[in-house]
Image (cartoon, coloured by chain):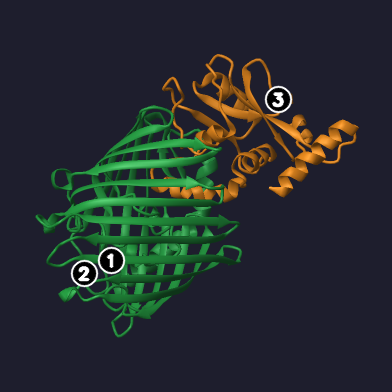
Chain colours: A green, B orange
Amino acid sequence: MRKPIGTFIIIVLYALLCQSAAAEHDTEQADSWYTYHWGRGLTIPAANLNVGGYFKSAYAQQEQQPGVLSLEDFSLFITWTPHARLRFFAEIEQHDWLNNTDGVAPFTKKLSVERLFVDFSLTESASIRFGKFLTPFGRWNVIHSAPLVWTTNRPVITDDKSFAPRANGLMLNYTWIVNEHNLDVAFYLDDSTDLEPRSFNNVIFDKAAGVRVNYELTEELQIGGSYLAYQRLFDLGLPTHHLVGVDFMWQHQGYELLMESLYHVRDDPLARLEEKGLFLQGVVPLAEKVSAVTRYEYFNTNAGVFNEQVVSHIGVAGLAWRPYLPLVIKSEYRFGDNNKSIAPSGLFVSVAMFF
Amino acid sequence: MMVHILARFLLVLGSVTHCPLLHADDILVVMGQAFASEKISPKQLANIYRRKTVINEAGERWNPINLSANDPLRLAFSQKIFQQSPDAMEAYWNAQYFQGIMPPYAVNSVEAMLRLLATTPGAIGYLLPCHVDKRVKVVFKLTVSESLAGECNR
């Protein structure tokens, strides 16, 4: 118990002390062969290389369960841009490396390749991505890192229950400018069985294909739609899964409204799978750098035992404090109805920081 | 939208009556004299500055250059192109950092901007008309509502 708490305190102190250190780096290293900017990583301009990352440490007190303090994520980003058209990106992560119930896991056991891809710009508007990347279904999954999101826990529909969060394969991105607003379309093909690098995540695709469309209605409002068809590695031979989803995000001077929905079906004549869900999340600035966050989630699935339909309602209410831009401290209470197995009620606190 | 229309109306009225009701200045979007320029729209410019468009028609890398975040010219440019201040844009750059994309390079002075534009292929920046010299050529003009006349003496 003593070691994880010590680590947690060190991490928090490090985060709070980093601001002054970062300010010094900005001025002192202007003519150096490298630059370090807190929250933007270490850049070596001559090599077109950037190394950065983030961590998340969390405390979870689920109802009728002992509290768990853990270093949930420690991620390293490596970006290399050797040519105008080429960009390599890798994210290597230690997931749940240490906590106060299991102690410290062997370093290599929890090491995973979260993302590993190369982007090639075909034209001004088109690019192609090859490798392992975040599945572009909805909004949350592609920006899920703890310093970017407002709550410690993900909404249920963005978790790995309905689709694999990462795909391995090829993605074509195209941007049209329609009435001076961006229309982005991404089409991707997955072959995880042959391409998946080492990963701790068992919920991966066998084969998948999908499309994601996003349109900026205004600078503050974006709407999107996603479609995904896939077969999972462990249900070979069963019919294909189909998912559709619509979403929007509105942001205005610290206020934010985010909605995502999905419908998921697999037409198995013996056991038809059907899931539908959505979440609606609002953010309201309370004071400078402090925001209130609230979320409602609905999830209706028959994926459990005997294909019984289970309807869950989940509520989340919390606060997020961003004393500095790369750093966020979050606290939330989650509650609900029929939520014990998918999103248990309880108190969750976390510290997350880009470095 | 109504505010925008009203602002345009006041500008036109001011210019017709020679009695400025609302002050407006121009920001010039510029590239190095030695480098090929192409026609770009304000939205394309925004995409270049958001690092969403990374190469030009010829396949060369765009190198957008910013002034420092508290520079009045940068504030006016950011407000015009993104309808957001540089500080508000930092949330966007946080999200891009997670994708491995870095914000444009920022310089501390107009002279540093001019030097970089003159020597860096694909570099694009913004200046006031009084700052422009033979090292750069104008790609297009942005009219902003802020008064930037005082910035010429820096």
Q: Is residue A38 visible?
A: no
Q: Position of residue B42 (x, y in %)?
A: 59, 33
Q: Is residue A28 visible?
A: yes
Q: Position of residue B24 (x, y in %)?
A: 77, 36
Q: What residue sits 60% from the left and 57% below the top? A: A253
Q: Position of residue A196 (x, y in %)?
A: 18, 47
**Which amino acid, by three-letter code, is at mark 2?**
Ala
Question: What label sits on residue A353 in the rendered view?
Answer: none
SS for tag 2? loop
Dot 2: within a 10 Å radius of its alpha carbon, few (fewer than 14), some, or many (20 or more) residues? some
Which image quadrant for residue A171? top left
Give yes or no for contact between labels 1 and 2 (Cβ–Cβ under 8 Å): yes
**What chain does mark 1 sit on?**
A
Question: What label sits on residue A303 in the rendered view?
Answer: 2
Looking at the image, is mark 1 or mark 2 earlier in the sequence? 1
In the image, taking residue B54 as reference, residue B133 lies left or right, namely: right
Q: Nearer the viewer, residue A7 or B128?
A: B128
**Which amino acid, by three-letter code, is at mark 1?**
Glu
Q: Position of residue B149 (x, y in %)?
A: 78, 33
Q: Which residue is mark 1?
A: A275
Q: Which residue is mark 3?
A: B131
